[in-house]
Image: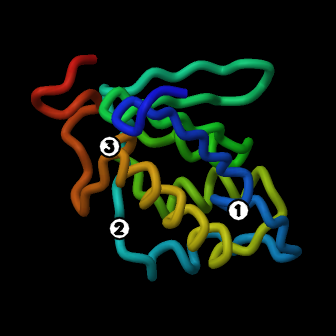
Amino acid sequence: MRGEAGRVRITDSKDVAGGRGAVQVCAAGARAGAMSNKYIARSGAVAERELGGEMIIMSAADSTLFSLSETATLIWQAADGRTPLSEIVERRVCEEFDVAFEDAYRDAEAFVEELSSHGILRVSDQPAAEAGPAPGETP
């Protein structure tokens, strides 16, 4: 590891974004409409690689590394800026894992907040016109 300015931190997100395995399955559409719409998009200022079945993401801004769980990877891959987070949770996370919508959504929000605080995900209350990096970011 280097000095504080160039320090690399590793965050394991396995307990984030629905990794607890609740026993209740999401009800189709019933609760998704009640959530405020958050649209998430991947930043262009990251490096991402899948290594041995594990998704690794690095922020170009602060060199923070994230090792994503299978659930967090589903959210990351679906972050197109046009699909509401509630829909991603309902259609991707709840269909793949046996988890209650409320638990999965709460964990997904924590995951999104963590990655957005490092500039890895962009969050908006409006859908993006098209997928891609924000102005000033390189694709």
Residue 81 seen in the current view: no
As helix, strand or loop, the secondary structure at mark 2 comes to: loop
Measured in 3D between alpha carbons, the distance from the residue under mark 3 to the one under mark 1, in whole angstroms, is 22 Å
Res. 56 image quadrant:
top right
**Outermost residue, front side:** 3
Task: Say what amino acid the circle numbered 2 marks.
Answer: Asn
Q: Quadrant of residue 6?
A: top left
Residue named by callout 2: 37
Task: Report crowding for label 3: few under 14, some 14 to 19, many 20 or more residues within 10 A (C-alpha).
Answer: some
**Kind of residue at disc 3:** Gly
Residue 115 image offset from top left, x and y in percent: 44, 49
Q: Is residue 49 above or below residue 25?
A: above
130 with respect to 24 (left or right): left
Q: Nearer the viewer, mark 3 or mark 2?
A: 3
Relative image position of residue 72 (x, y in whole percent) = 63, 47
Q: Label 3, on which residue? A: 119
Relative to 109, residue 44 above or below: above
Residue wearing tag 1: 18
**Residue pictured at 56% horizontal, 62% vertical:** 108
Q: Residues within 10 Å of mark 2 (few under 14, many from 20)?
A: some
* Amino acid, disc 1: Gly
The quarter in which the C terminus is drawn is top left
Alpha carbon separation for disc pair 3 and 2: 20 Å
Drawn side of residue 43 relative to residue 91, left or right: left
